[in-house]
Image: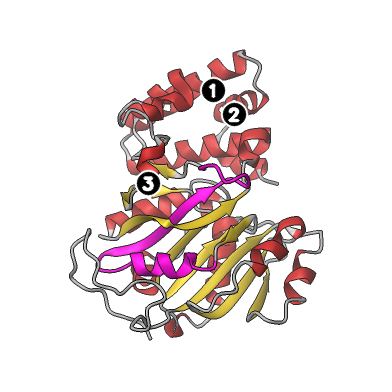
Amino acid sequence: MRRAASNDCEDSHDRPPVGSGDTPRPGVAVVIVTYNSAAVLESCLRSLRSDLVQLKAVVVADNGSRDDSLAIAKAVSDLPIVTVELGRNAGYAAAINAGVEAIDVADLDAVMVLNPDCVVRSDTIARLWQALGGRRGIAVPRLVNPDGTLQPSLRRMPTVRRALAEALLGARAGRIGSLGELISDPASYARPGPAVWATGAAMLVSTEAMAAIGPWDESFLLYSEETEFALRAADKGWTLWYEPSAVVEHTGGESATSPRLGALVTVNKVALFRRRHNLVMAGAYYLVLLLGESLRALMGRRVARAAVVALLRPVGRTRVLAD
């Protein structure tokens, strides 16, 4: 069932439309990472039912939930559920890796990585699969909020200039050309195309690309792991492709309201940037992020205050933040 990568150019499509009788159904596994996700997991699982793909496995990789997440997963009888219990909050990347290890990747065309607070439309995975091809190894959908409004999910390459723009202008920087890292212009989400990286709540990865890219980096625990994965994919010649016709409803938003999680977002941004740049650039990036969070902290924002404290601590304490 697996297909070899073609030599098609980035913008070409030669695959018949989704649902066409000429389109073979891809073999796909879904890996869902749970942590006290009982309130949202059932809706997520229910949305996966589709006749457009061969759903080979739905892996629920649980990070030591203390609620009924595992019981809800095990109670589903009409999906090929596989449960993996990590026994602790090992992080998003570790759970993805454990989930992938629990399935026979050789029997698959692609793996869908999914947050439990996502609801997938019936044709979404098939449309993402259709978007893959050539050197497109990762396909991401249009994310929407529960009320149907756009949830900006695409990002540009992290740079010191963009960090400074966002430190001074906030989300408004994304509306001024390519000034900000976050792409916030709604027009950009109306058309398909390549992106540097995207929110990791929902992404389809071909098994060819997965084998080349390697496992997710577990050192980030939570946040920036999808950035690292996408950048590493690009290093190896694979493109992340945005497909607006594939739609996923995503609740999300915890990092914007939780001081602990918001701090972890900021600290991990610094950690990733340091890995990919020299000491001077990494130091400048750190200082710019510290400036931005300090300005917001002075405005009374609790999340920003937590980020400032975390930035001034040794980076080795990032795991404590996620306990």
- The residue under label 3 is which amino acid type? Ala
Residue depicted at x 69% and y 62% = 43
Q: Reply above or below: 102 against 228.
A: below
Using the image as rendered, state which of residue 153 and residue 221 is in the foreground.
153
Mark 2 is on which residue type?
Answer: Ala
Q: How many neighbours does mark 3 have within 10 angstroms: few (below 14), some (14-19), or many (20 or more)?
A: few
Q: Can you identify the residue that label 3 sits on?
A: 190
Label 1, label 3: how far apart the Cα atoms are: 32 Å
Residue 237 visible somewhere in the drawing: yes
What residue occupies the far top of the structure in this picture? Answer: 298
- Decide whether residue 125 is among the magenta residues: yes
Q: Residue at x 42, y 79 (%)?
A: 26
Residue at x-position 33% and y-position 49%? 191
Element under disc 1? helix
Mark 1 to mark 2: distance in Å?
7 Å
- Residue 33 occupies which quadrant of the picture? bottom right
Residue 5 image position (x, y, % from top left): 26, 74
Q: Mark 1 = which residue?
A: 293
Q: Secondary structure at mark 2?
A: helix
Q: Nearer the viewer, residue 315 or 160?
A: 160
Camera-side residue of 176 and 288: 176
Label 3 vs 2, first from the N-terminus: 3
Q: Is residue 157 left or right of residue 151?
A: left
Where is mark 2, residue-wise?
307
Quarter location, residue 237: bottom left
Mark 1 or mark 2: which comes first in sequence?
A: 1
Residue situated furthest right in the rendering: 67
State if disc 2 and disc 1 touch (CB < 8 Å): yes
Magenta span: 122-150
Q: Earlier in the sequence, mark 1 or mark 3?
A: 3
User: Label 3, label 2: how many angstroms apart (C-alpha)?
Assistant: 33 Å
